[in-house]
Amino acid sequence: MNEEMSKEEKKWFGTLLSYAKGSGGRLGASVVFSMISLLSGIIPYYCVYRILDLYIGGTLEKDFVMHWCGIALIAYLVKVVCFGISTGISHFVAFHVLEGLRLKVADTFLKAPLGEVYAHSIGEIKGVIVDKIEDIEPPLAHVVPEGAGHILLPIVCFVALAMVDIRVALAALLALPLGLIFMMLTFKISGKNMDKYQEANAHMSSVIVEYVEGIEVIKAFGKSGVSYEKFAGSIRDYRDFVIEWLESTWVTMKLAFAFMPATLLGVVPVSILLVGKGSMTVSEMALSVMLAMSMVISMAKIEIFSNGLRQMQYTVLEIQKLLNIKSLPEPESEKKPEHYSIELRDVHFTYDEEDGEVLHGIDLAMKEGSFTALVGPSGGGKSTVAKLIARFWDVSSGSIRIGGVDIKDLKVTTLADIVSFVTQDNFLFSRSLMENIRLGNPKATDEEVIAAAKAACCDEFIRKLPDGYNTSAGEAGKRLSGGERQRIAIARMMLKNAPIVILDEATAFTDPENETKLQESIANLTKGKTLLVIAHRLSTIKKADQIVVLNGGQIEAQGTQEELMESSPLYQRMWQAHIGARNWAAGSTTASV
């Protein structure tokens, strides 16, 4: 495992470029243009040297000055143009890499079991997809192309200095060893805390997201003081950690920044000494100082860029860990189901080994076009069964088959196409209601979307909104009530028109006025489909072909309404409790009237 991680660390940059959609060649071109730009920047120094040399010699002429000034101007224009081309290309590549990474993370979560997704906090996922991936852009767009140029420029300057006088060239490197030592010490101290920094940052992001998302509950229960303290405490802990970390590297970092680019520390005194001895001309000394100053700028940039490159490496490796989470295995070649019956064979399932098994040998058959209802006490395993059929998780043992084909032998996209799943907690995206419904069938026309909305009893309340179907649902659909969100989700399911429909308390938040209409619409639109309904309102599933009573992760009884009323004491109690609740609600309504 450590060897694999070591290999990943070594090839992290190649991994990053693999998400650039074949843009590696473009990044190489950006590096070349950056090098040309920086090298063009030292040509004016040579032009100044030639003019100064003739001026000191007393032989300077106007045409000569114009000639070298023209060359300097052309070199400067080349520098500016090449720099613009380099940064343009590098930003193009960088944003393609960011796009590729975000799509890859989204695809990874889509194909991963929900348990693997839930193992990561919202703050951590948001931090990776939004913040950390975005943080890659500046280093990739600037550090890589410009850094390559700034590595080449000191080498070229050193060679040029050596051509002037090898002693001056060596003097330019006088402070470099000390700078490198202090920089390596900084990286060593800093590296020990980088993982802790990433963890602290993820924890703070998670607490912030939790605080903001739970603000309504916090205010409702008067816990704002306690919750705010947790929120503020996480920020203080993060601040204290970062300050302590910076303090530990402050001295070595400042010394590295002081000594690394200190080329003039050796060049100026050595050049003066050589001029005094007559071994160097004043114009050569001026050229040496200008070249040394170019090295100063590049060495300082290299220090800054090396830190950015190091940060990018840590970020890429962290993203790679997220991309390496276990995905649901998919077949190389899939078998297509010939029909849409569902069969569970000796299904066992465990969310977590520590919590124990939640389903114990479920055997259940649902014929194509049949209506099956799952009922039972809370925690009995009803939603788990439904989610396993949709393959949100894989069974621990046993198998689930659709049309005689194990769902593991179907591609995730194929299974998603044939199964519609509506839960009681329905998520809507921050886009128009028209587009939220159209997610069920992206190719649907506006008329088809509106027809689905009418069938789901949405049309009336949608048309009362300020922008009608173009009204935004708000973040996570919070602009709508729970019942309205649920009806939008049902409309989406109707538009999808999948052969298998799973409804997990799909009308739980629907008001009584619309529930009857909605039940009739669902019944009409699911005719001929394999329908699985999880319900607590037993009166809504009386006409089911079979009712399955789940209790403690096992099937306690199954049959029709009449059969269970005769044979299942648990179902009888549930029915009596349901009828009693309905009578109580009816009595309360009458009394209030």
Image (spheres, helix red, strand yellow):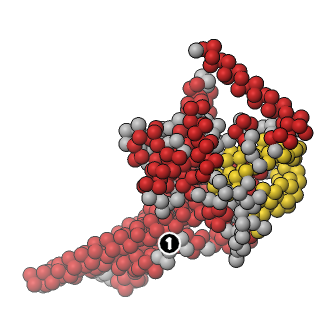
How many numbered dots are placed on residues in this image? 1
Amino acid type shown at disc 1: Ala
The image shows residue 151 at horizontal and vertical percentages of 45, 74
The image shows residue 506 at horizontal and vertical percentages of 64, 43
Q: Which residue is mark 1?
A: 20
Instruction: Name the one closer to the observer, 225 or 593.
Output: 593
Position of residue 153 in the picture relative to residue 186 (left or right): left
**Occupied quadrant, residue 310:** bottom right
Mark 1: few/some/many CA within 10 Å (<14, 14-19, 20+): many
Q: Is residue 558 above or below residue 214?
A: below
The N terminus lies in quadrant: bottom right
Name the residue: 40% across, 69% down: 92
Name the residue: 84% across, 50% down: 359
Name the residue: 68% across, 41% down: 505
The image shows residue 116 at horizontal and vertical percentages of 71, 55
Position of residue 408 in the picture relative to residue 263 (left or right): right
**Occupied quadrant, residue 275:** bottom left
Position of residue 441 in the picture relative to residue 538 (left or right): left
The C terminus lies in quadrant: top right
Can the viewer see residue 464 in this picture?
A: yes
Tag 1's secondary structure?
A: loop
Name the residue: 20% across, 76% down: 73
**Occupied quadrant, residue 584:** top right
The image shows residue 43 at horizontal and vertical percentages of 28, 79
Instruction: Name the one closer to the observer, 79 or 328.
Output: 328
Q: Is residue 30 above or below residue 352?
A: below
Can the viewer see residue 473 in this picture?
A: no
Instruction: Name the one closer to the observer, 373 or 542.
Output: 542
Q: Is residue 540 above or below residue 131?
A: above
Q: Is residue 534 above or below residue 73?
A: above
